[in-house]
């Protein structure tokens, strides 16, 4: 670990995030943000230091991994991590091309953010990834978040089941479920095609932005809406993206 990093907080109930970032200005900022947000956080500058932390006594719950690292790249390190287990990984990079994001996701990354990340969004994505890996349970709340209710619909995140307002079960493909989960975890918030591609891990879209539109259209149809509607459960905002236009209650 870099000696100029603040020491990791090793007490409390926060989940432990390892930040692998060679930027000496950005790394301390990310560590401070995570600690303020209730996480334990450790820093590493490269793959060698990353492996030292992972081999240490303190369990790591998630790796925030820069792609452009000296020595082995974040893509290579992500492949190594995934080959050894299911430790969650969020890639962090200055690259903005959809093809680069898809490469990272296909290597097994759980999410992908472009630098500099929005602090609130970064914390939200870390919590969302940890929650998904926990099977839908809440992160750091002390309670379960198994069921999202929105506009009369109910999404059971443990069973991956969607129930209509009238009580009937609606079948979802894996891609439709991932897309819907991205919406219900971010209600009343505009999500661009690129964000939806990242959040749903690129599995359903093949890296093509227009395919996001097709997937949203199919999901909207199952929610009882129309492809071009501007109101309803999923709202279209021309030139901006899509938004879940109703509140979500978790239980």
Image (cartoon, rainbow, N blue to C red):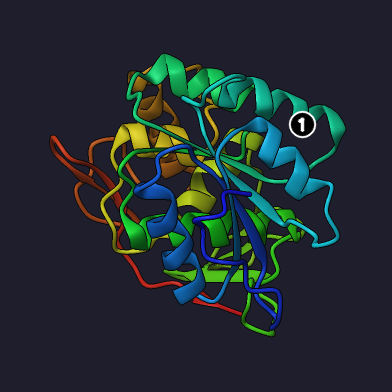
Which of these two is toward me, 59 or 55?
55
- Please give left or right for residue 151 compared with residue 106 in the image: left
Where's the C terminus, which quadrant?
bottom right
**Residue 85 seen:** yes
Residue of label 1: 82
Residue located 35% across and 63% down the image: 120
- Please give left or right for residue 130 compared with residue 101 in the image: right
Q: Is residue 58 above or below residue 149?
A: above
**Residue 218 seen:** no
- Please give left or right for residue 81 compared with residue 227 in the image: right
Q: Quadrant of residue 173?
A: top right
Residue located 29% across and 63% down the image: 188
Which of these two is toward me, 28 or 119?
28
Residue located 46% across and 61% down the image: 124
Q: Is residue 251 above or below residue 124?
A: below
The residue at the far left in this view is: 239
The mark tally for this picture is 1
- Disc 1, SS: helix
Measuring from the top left, give residue 13's x and y in whole percent: 70, 80
Q: Is residue 118 above or below residue 154?
A: above
The residue at the far front in this view is: 3
Q: Quadrant of residue 141?
A: bottom right
Query: Badge 1: how crowded within 10 Å, few (<14), some, or many (20+)?
Result: some
Which of these two is toward me, 61 or 186?
61
- Please give left or right for residue 82 compared with residue 207 in the image: right
Residue located 72% across and 54% down the image: 133
Measuring from the top left, give residue 76's x and y in whole percent: 65, 20
Which of these two is toward me, 83 or 137?
83
Measuring from the top left, give residue 74's x and y in whole percent: 57, 27
């Amino acid at each position: 670990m870099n000696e100029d990093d603040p020491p990791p907080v090793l007490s409390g109930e926060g989940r432990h995030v390892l930040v692998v970032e060679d930027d000496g200005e950005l790394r301390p900022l990310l560590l401070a943000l995570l600690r303020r947000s209730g996480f334990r956080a450790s820093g590493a500058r490269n793959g060698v230091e990353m492996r030292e932390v992972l081999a240490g006594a303190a369990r790591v719950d998630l790796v925030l991994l820069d792609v452009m690292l000296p020595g082995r790249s974040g893509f290579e390190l992500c492949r190594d991590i995934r080959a050894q287990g299911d430790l969650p990984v969020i890639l962090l990079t200055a690259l903005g091309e959809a093809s680069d994001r898809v490469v990272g996701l296909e290597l097994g990354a759980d999410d992908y953010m472009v630098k500099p990340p929005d602090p609130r969004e970064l914390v939200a994505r870390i919590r969302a990834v940890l929650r998904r890996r926990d099977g839908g349970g809440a992160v750091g709340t002390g309670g379960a978040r198994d069921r999202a209710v929105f506009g009369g619909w109910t999404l059971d995140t443990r069973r991956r089941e969607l129930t209509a307002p009238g009580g009937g079960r609606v079948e979802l493909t894996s891609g439709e479920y991932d897309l819907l989960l991205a919406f219900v975890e971010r209600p009343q918030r505009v999500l661009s095609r690129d964000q939806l591609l990242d959040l749903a891990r690129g599995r359903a879209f093949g890296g093509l932005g227009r395919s996001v539109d097709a997937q949203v259209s199919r999901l909207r149809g199952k929610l009882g809406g129309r492809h071009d509607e501007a109101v309803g459960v999923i709202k279209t905002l021309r030139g901006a993206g899509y938004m879940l236009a109703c509140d979500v209650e978790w239980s």
